[in-house]
Amino acid sequence: MSSNRAPVTEFTKDTVIVVFGASGDLAKKKTFPALFGLFTEDLLPSNTSIIGYARSPIELEDFRKRISSYFKTPTPELEQKAKDFVALCTYVSGNYDKDESFLNLLSHVESIEEKHETKNRLFYLAVPPSVFLPVATQLKKHLHPGDSGVARVIVEKPFGHDLASSEELQKGLAPLWTEEEIFRIDHYLGKEMVKNILPFRFSNQFINAAWNKDNIANIQISFKEPFGTEGRGGYFNDIGIIRDVMQNHLLQVLCLIGMERPVSTNAEDIRDEKVKLLRAVQPLSMDDVILGQYGASEDGTKPAYVDDETVPKDSRAVTFAALHMQIHNERWEGVPFILRAGKALDQAKVEVRIQYKDAAKGMFNSLPRNELVIRIQPSESIYAKMNSKLPGYSTKNIVTDLDLTYHDRYEGIRIPEAYESLILDCIKGVHSNFVRDDELKVSWKIFTPLLHEIENNKDIVPEIYPYGSRAPESLPKFLSERNYRRG
Ligand code: NDP
Ligand code: BG6
């Protein structure tokens, strides 16, 4: 729970990182590449060893070859770095719930630690949720160093399926691992532009002063992907877009956009403010939403969601949603926050669009509204749509952008991958960009009534939109009814 102000221990040397589920997709796409990224930047603690752990029997050399294939090494220098990195990696095969397997892992860890002065153990659970608890239990039983060291556990979403299952999971974890030891990843919190939201808001007085219901007409947080669930339909069908990216990633962005100024940059001060904001959010109901599912593309080249063989033909799974979130507090009363997310849309884009209220008329007839856009990806940027006089003799107003596009402004600066930045935070013991237990609980309280209503009421059928389109047809009306005006 909140307000633990104990000093944090940074792992600066002698660290053992164990990646559970090392044979899997996340380990391949994110965890090992992120560890390699940190290694190339010299950001891993000195004397770090990495152990891959999974059930699949894999010979050490094959494991190292497999890991090497996860990295891009376009230069001889990087190729050498990759060789040095894989030399730090070993592999242990074992079950996720058997004492013998974990005792075997322990003896491997201890053999590495013979040369260490301290025991710094980081356990990364890149495993399906069904084995979170067995692994966490075995780790606590056999690999927690107690008072002779420090242990941390990184867990991946999903943190439950609804309020009850999330509480159940937490009830299982809490007696084993303290909040200080648990790092719940929401990888959006590791993205550069998401990490910039608080500094941008609170260190620029002209932005901060107008950040309220007196000046802002509405805020949209949008997530668009240009591909469907091809190949992942089976996994997605029970989850849907709301659980997949909205209850977690987009809600975290909403917290950073909406929260009050934390009293310090301490993790607990930041997370206290997030929880306070979430408690002011009205739980969602069907009056607040549009639901969609993608059909085949108009030219027939892309399949409908239900064409996926792993999906039932009558699936009502939601692949697009727009949700009107209402925040009942002094700053935001009456300002619609719209979360929109969809698969199989026209482009890849994640952004926050803050639309300001109309400028006073009289002097002007009708001006486009100011907008401030924080582009999270691709091409990180912040730009503001301003009204300005057309230069020269004209007295006409035009819309122009004040543009801070990162790759133009900060040429040559490497923006770390979200997972690199989060694993580094965990190494440093900093929790600011991880999800706290009470944040989870209050976020599930907002979403659970809606999710249950969608699942239980068979009359709720998502609107079909063509693969590759901008959105379901009803979206423009939904937005204009919520005070959004297209410029
Ligand atoms: P995988 O399905 O690839 O599973 C990881 C490993 O766990 C597998 O290689 C397998 O290893 C083992 N495993 C798989 N199924 C079971 C099972 N039923 N019982 C026990 N062990 C099993 O998962 P991902 O790597 O995709 O995801 C891992 C975690 O990360 C999940 O919680 C997921 O929700 C989360 N996540 C994944 C993302 C991604 O991009 N893949 C993105 C965000 C979060 P072995 O059989 O060798 O033990
Ligand atoms: C994951 C979702 O959490 O986030 C995926 O499960 C989604 O469905 C992904 O594609 C998006 O992450 P990113 O970093 O590619 O925007």
Image (cartoon, rainbow, N blue to C red):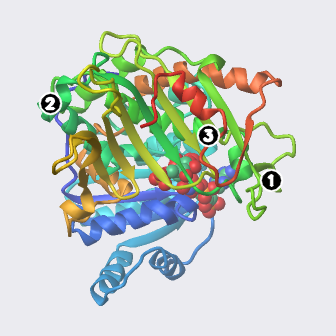
Q: The residue under label 1 is which amino acid type? A: Thr
Disc 1 residue lies near ligand 1 with CB under 8 A: no
Q: Residue at x 25, y 32 (%)?
A: 267
User: Contact, CB < 8 Å: mark 1 with mark 2?
Assistant: no
Q: The residue under label 2 is which amino acid type? A: Phe
Q: The residue under label 3 is which amino acid type? A: Ile
Q: Nearer the viewer, residue 130 or 259?
A: 259
Residue 241: which numbered mark, if any? Answer: 3
Give the quarter of the figure containing the N terminus. top left
Task: Write down the quadrant of residue 415 in the picture.
Answer: bottom left
Task: Write down the quadrant of residue 231 in the picture.
Answer: bottom right
- Give the image quadrant in which the ligand numbered 1 is located: bottom right
Residue 402 in the image, given as x and y percentages of width and height: 22, 47
Question: Considering only vertical position in the picture, is 339 above or below 88?
Answer: above
Residue 206: which numbered mark, if any? Answer: 2
Circle nearer the viewer, 1 or 2: 2
Does the image show residue 68?
Answer: yes
Q: Secondary structure at mark 1?
A: loop
Q: Residue at x 52, y 62 (%)?
A: 22
Q: Residue furthest bottom?
A: 76
Question: Considering only vertical position in the picture, is 68 above or below 17?
Answer: below
Residue 365 in the image, given as x and y percentages of width and height: 33, 26
What residue did someone put label 1 on?
A: 310
Task: Write down the quadrant of residue 374 in the picture.
Answer: top left
Report how many numbered discs are placed on residues in the image: 3
